[in-house]
Amino acid sequence: MGVPWTITVYASEAAAQAAIAAAFVEIARLEGILSDYDPDSELSQLSAAAPTSGPVAVGDDLWRVLAMAVAWRDRSGGAFDPTIGPLTTLWRQARRSGVMPRADKLAAARQAVGPDRLVLDVDRMTVMLRERAMRLDLGGIGMGYAIDRGMDVLAMHGITSAMIDASGDIAVSGPPPGADAWTIEVDARVDEDGAGREMLTLVNAAVTTSGDAFQAVEIDGTRYSHVVDPRTGLGVAGPAAVTVIAADCTTADAVATAASVLGAEAGLAFVETVPGAAARFVASSDGERREARSTRWPAQLAQPRR
């Protein structure tokens, strides 16, 4: 999925090797379904068929992630949108070139983006793409889903203490031997002095950070994130980051993406509506650091995985 993955488990060597190998097989399988970079993935093949002549049946995993993505789209008021692919394609080009997308190209891309462009039939588990040049993008939820499924595989192999880290998208199960919880450092990286760092203790939970720390571009003096705002077609302006804790990584991933687009005030209000979730926003402007936290931060989650 374009980032380093690390799986850590506590078990005998033979059990650990078997469980980790099986988890990586599952993650690779899901990449072949959910990736919008791979032209042969099920997601890319679906996008390539737009506009579909009618409802199209899709596999179980793609259906689940699309259904969850649409649910988060509705819940976030469109801040999270799985049809955003045409806009993310333009923004990737802008990040490479350092030049803002042309207004006419943004307008054309927006024609293929929006809630009425994607139709899901819940009873038949089918998908219909209504607009030419549509491109689905599950980057804000697919990695979290793959992490959760990897954790499920580890559990099926009898692993009760594990962590999966996909370049900062992290899920943990039971604590390491001799400890009460996993200790995880989160770093928003908007401060050169490291003030954005914080230690969290988590059990059966997930944490992810969305922002411009590692994937960003500066255009005309403004720093922009790789996270695209569906309302503007541009990256979210920074420096800024939001860290979200939730019971599972699918939720943490989607909520962090939506909250990043919404910004601190609306984003925190949104996070408060998600049971068990907590968030911290960190931003910097004119050398001044700003921070805002939800009422449940820092959440010390210890609950069965869903």
Image (cartoon, helix red, strand yellow):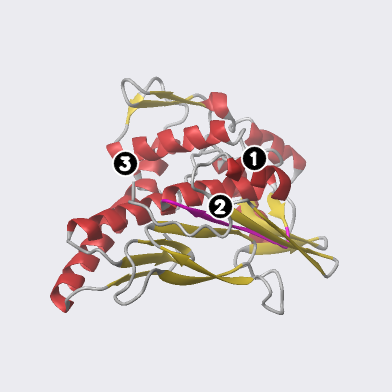
Q: Is residue 233 left or right of residue 117?
A: right
Image coords of residue 199 (percent x, y): 54, 72
The type of residue carrying mark 1 is Pro
Looking at marks 2 and 3 on the same chain, the residue that comes earlier in the sequence is marked by: 3
Image coords of residue 233 (percent x, y): 68, 43
The circle drawn on residue 61 is 3
Asked whether residue 139 is in view, the answer is no
Q: Is residue 123 magenta?
A: no
Q: Is residue 59 left or right of residue 281?
A: left
Residue tagged 2? 278
In space, the residues marked 2 and 3 are separated at their CA atoms by 27 Å
The circle drawn on residue 230 is 1
Front position in the image: 237 or 306: 306
The circle drawn on residue 113 is none
Asked whether residue 279 is in view, the answer is yes
Q: Which element carries disc 2, helix, strand or loop?
A: strand
Image coords of residue 165 (percent x, y): 41, 66
Q: Is residue 72 left or right of residue 8?
A: right
The type of residue carrying mark 2 is Ala
Front position in the image: 124 or 95: 124
Q: Quadrant of the N terminus?
A: bottom left
Residue at the (55%, 31%) spot, across then down: 74
* CB-based contact (under 8 Å), mark 1 and mark 3: no
Q: Is residue 130 left or right of residue 235?
A: left
Front position in the image: 195 or 168: 195
Looking at marks 1 and 3 on the same chain, the residue that comes earlier in the sequence is marked by: 3
In space, the residues marked 1 and 2 are separated at their CA atoms by 23 Å
In the displayed structure, 217 sits above or below 60; it is: below
Q: How many marks?
A: 3
Residue at the (62%, 47%) spot, across then down: 259
The type of residue carrying mark 3 is Asp
